[in-house]
Image (cartoon, helix red, strand yellow):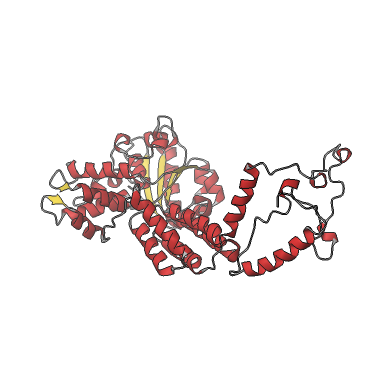
Amino acid sequence: MDALFDLSGPGEGGDSFADVPPGAPLAVRMRPRTLAELVGQEHLLAPGAPLHQLVTGDSPMSVILWGPPGSGKTTVAHLVARSAQRKFVALSALSAGVKDVRAVIDAARADRRRSGKATVLFIDEVHRFTKTQQDSLLAAVEDRTVTLLAATTENPYFSVVSPLLSRCVLLTLRPLGETAVGKLVDRALTDERGLGGTVTLSPEARDHLVRLAGGDVRKALTALEAAASTADGEIGLATIEQALDVAAVRYDRDGDGHYDISSALIKSLRGSDVDAALHWLARMLVAGEDPRYIARRLVIFASEDIGMADPVALQVAVAAAEAVAFIGLPEGRLNLAQAVIHLATAPKSNAVIVAIDEAMADVRAGRTGTVPAHLRDAHYAGAKGLGHGAGYRYPHDDPRGVLSQQYAPGPALGRDYYRPSGHGSERAVAERLDKLRAIIRSEQPRNSHS
């Protein structure tokens, strides 16, 4: 659970950072107090692992924590703050400047000379620091005047300057799975720090809450607290819907609904119904579907159902997939929607998948043959003595840029795998392809299999 409490500074974090203020939100009250209470990130928590060393104070290494909202970045900072062996200072990149950073570094240097006590400097949302602000940390991190603990939701390879990144250990926190989020919701319902058993949660409401949280524990607990404030005994689905401000979508990501909705999206795209496609996309997003899964389906569709009829479609789909991986949701919905609109309105052709499937069928059926001698690699010693490359004709020597020559092995001669449609850009490809094949095959032997 990250960003669950206010960051003040510069100044010592100490107990003021770790203590829970009166009337704090449920998400703040339920933040883990020890490593044993931390849920998720098992890949970083084994004894001797970097995160374990950071929290227990076994290592002075500087660390950048990279992960999505609610994955535990600020919770880790909270656990480090509770360590009595180190002075802890917290800054927020939203309000701190170079002057604040230098003040912390000067104080840390004085403390180390006076008492030998190490200082941990926590910077939340470090990606919001300018290059100058980040550069101001370099010397202090290099000589360990401070142990830097920085949190970011953005890719540090793009948002953190290289010199600072090279001086830190990068720990990637993964989005919490539904099992982990559910465990924390259940804990909040019964724990005295949380709701203390004053309300219960129906199975349908719990499933909806966990799914719509999307791995963000803070979002789940905030919604749970809002629902509990209006519930009388049991929190039902309608109450959770209202708390989340999202209608419950009858959609099982692991069952038939998952495949039915996904199929409906692809078939709407194939049928060029942009409005229906946007509806199914919205259904998937509201139901909490992994946007990366949606993006992968769009990339496949761009080649399978559009192909050369609109070669730009694949570029759009890949760009959307990269954008979603880079920025995530909710903004990533715009990239997915743009891709869906482009793919739905693009001219359609399945010639690409037909071509590769027919070629692979021929290969599996044994229509392979050897590589013609003139096409074989002639760049190593002795190749010419074997006749490799002999007789190869260089297409650029012909003013047309193409000439008659055998490229396919004997059994595949004359096989027309790619048959372009007359749709979109493929119409021009079809006209050009007829001319290319006529020139290339003008002097080829006939294939008895064609």
Going by the image, does 258 lie left or right of 344?
left
Instruction: Tell which residue pokes out farthest to the top in this image.
Output: 47
Nearest the camera: 95 or 441? 441
Q: Is residue 4 left or right of residue 228?
A: right
Q: How many marks?
A: 0
Residue found farthest to the front:
448
**Residue 92 at x, y percent in the picture:** 38, 54
> Which residue is the extreme one toward the left?
232
Camera-side residue of 235 and 65: 235
Q: Position of residue 159 (x, y in %)?
A: 50, 54
Foreground: 133 or 203? Answer: 203
* Viewer-side residue, 237 vs 141: 237
Residue 132 is at least partly visible in this image: no
Give the answer, above or below, for where 243 lies relative to 366: below
Q: Is residue 91 visible?
A: yes
Residue 265, relative to residue 83: is it above or below?
below
Residue 256 point in image, percent of width and height: 34, 50
Hey, which quadrant is residue 424 in on the image? bottom right
Q: Which residue shows up at 56% across the image and 60% down it?
A: 350
Left-right relation of 376 to 131: right
Asked whether, in this view, residue 154 is left or right of residue 211, the answer is: right
Q: Residue at 34% of width from left, 37% of height from top?
A: 83
Which quarter of the figure has residue 395? Answer: bottom right
Q: Residue 319 location, x and y as percent?
A: 53, 59
